[in-house]
Amino acid sequence: NAGVTQTPKFRVLKTGQSMTLLCAQDMNHEYMYWYRQDPGMGLRLIHYSVGEGTTAKGEVPDGYNVSRLKKQNFLLGLESAAPSQTSVYFCASSYPRGFGANVLTFGAGSRLTVL
Amino acid sequence: DQQVKQNSPSLSVQEGRISILNCDYTNSMFDYFLWYKKYPAEGPTFLISISSIKDKNEDGRFTVFLNKSAKHLSLHIVPSQPGDSAVYFCAFKPDEEKLVFGKGTKLTVNP
């Protein structure tokens, strides 16, 4: 059982380049999330989705776009990468309600460096 | 504005002693508070939680205490083990859809 899988694990970009991070989950979770982790800043929510075809903004959405075309996949896009987007990105998923909604399952992270 | 604060970036304790990690919050309208644990190069994993209607929840070596009057949450680890060395995040749900994390406290348990 894979859980939450993120690809790629590492990527180096030049300023202005674009890229997409892919998150796939096999737990039939309704909710999916993208967080970024920066030193001293903890985990900050970028965007999230409460179901196939839906997306919503989190705390730090600027510079990112997302899509949830299939229930199991949640894509995070950077249209024009900036050095401030150098970070470790985590995808997570959960059930929609009840206590299970509190227990997010996270992927192993994607480390992105923008030069 | 930070709704949940972990004021200690790091904590170092000796193996076998108690580790106490703290978290302060501002908004009282939460159903659950949670603690997540994160090892380097891995994603965070759920550790323990507490309902807002309780003041204590215990799971093995881990106990979470909630002081609603002080708006304070703490995680006790007894006895601490070297394998507990990790970053610990407190978290809460401001609404049904999102989970918001604190900045984390790095715990180091020395053998």
Image: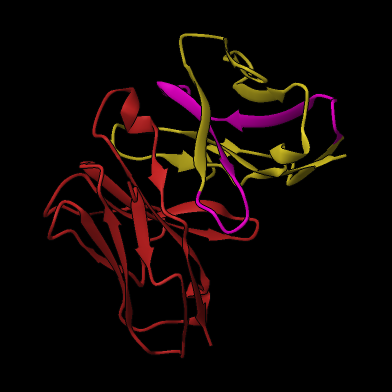
Chain colours: A red, B yellow
Residue visible at 23% across and 34% down?
Answer: A96
Q: Residue B16: say if magenta.
A: yes
- In the figure, A104 relative to A106: above or below? above
- In the figure, A5 relative to B75: above or below? below
- Taking depth in this image into account, of B19 and B83 the one nearest to the observer is B83
- In the figure, B84 relative to A14: above or below? above
Left or right: A78, with B90 as reference point = left
Q: Position of residue A2 (x, y in %)?
A: 34, 51
Q: Position of residue B49 (x, y in %)?
A: 50, 23
Residue visible at 56% across and 30% down?
Answer: B25
Left or right: B73, with A34 as reference point = right
Instruction: Determine the image quadrant of residue B82.
Output: top right
Q: Position of residue A46 (x, y in %)?
A: 38, 58
Left or right: A67, with B15 as reference point = left
Magenta segment: B14-43
- In the figure, B12 relative to B52: above or below? below
Q: How many marks?
A: 0
- Taking depth in this image into account, of A92 and A67 the one nearest to the observer is A92
Instruction: Determine the image quadrant of residue B60.
Output: top right
Residue visible at 34% across and 23% down?
Answer: A99
Residue visible at 78% across and 23% down?
Answer: B79
Q: Position of residue B16 (x, y in %)?
A: 84, 26
Q: Residue B37: say if magenta.
A: yes
